[in-house]
Image (cartoon, rainbow, N blue to C red):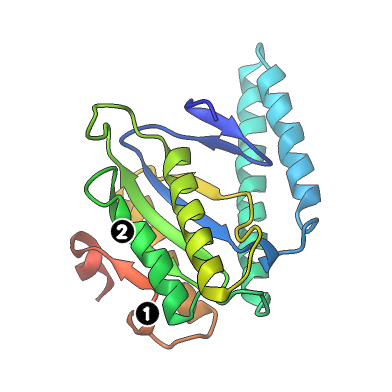
Amino acid sequence: MEKKEFYKRHLPHYQQSGQAYFITWCLKDAIPPKAFSDYTLQLQQLKIAISDEKSNLEKLNELKFQYAILRKKYIKAFDDLLHLQTKTLVDLSKDVNTKIVVDALRFWEGKRLQNDAFCVMPNHVHWVFTIMDKDQNSEPIYLQDILQSVKRFTANKINQAEKISGTLWHSESFDTTIRNDKHKYNAINYSLNNPVVAGLVENWWEWSGNFVNEDWLSAFF
């Protein structure tokens, strides 16, 4: 895929070197294939309307506001459904699978990114991190490359561990650009407490798939 700061599948994705992100992705069978077709269609229609609107700034801002609200509803519905879906072919909370995902999330640490926090749930992953400006060859670093690398590696390793084959991950990832430290705190807090909200543990630090780096650790105790 061509490297660029904007690309889209069902949802638009923006990527920029040196940017912090909050990413969520899930197993392929964690959600029904057509569960969000209405949301997807509405988002696509709003995106087209935003692209076509050139002259009326007030209308353009209103369309962008509608898009932002709808996208939040989409992600909220996505998260709610993930918590309800407890039967998938693969359980990411198994020790062997959790380790595979954690190792992949840590692989680019200090090379392409700085990890802030992550949470490996039974059927999905939350990840908060900051991409570096340049790699060791002074080339720009793109979000899509990192996600493709992590998802490809984990899919191969988990398929081997589970003795299965085929596509493991849902093709879509939900990425949110982190605006500031407050936004990052909220993303980390949401990620760490996901197992608590799902009723899997009483305290976030009891979940083996959780991690938060030292810079943020004191904020959650």
Is the residue 60 above or below the residue 141 in the image? above
Q: Residues within 10 Å of mark 2 (few under 14, many from 20)?
A: some
Q: Earlier in the sequence, mark 2 or mark 1?
A: 2
Query: What element does badge 1 sit on?
Result: loop
Q: Nearer the viewer, residue 154 or 10?
A: 154
Q: Which amino acid type is shown beneath numbered disc 1?
A: Ser
Inspect this view and state whether residue 146 appears: yes
Front label number (2 vs 1): 2
Q: Nearer the viewer, residue 218 or 64?
A: 218
Figure quadrant of the C terminus: bottom left
Q: Residues within 10 Å of mark 1 (few under 14, many from 20)?
A: some
The residue indicated by pointer 1 is 208
Residue at image location 39% in from the left, 81% down from the top: 207
In the shown orientation, is residue 157 left or right of residue 18? right
The residue indicated by pointer 2 is 106
Residue at image location 68% in from the left, 75% down from the top: 85
Q: Nearer the viewer, residue 31 or 111?
A: 111
Figure quadrant of the N terminus: top right
Quarter of the view holding residue 107: bottom left
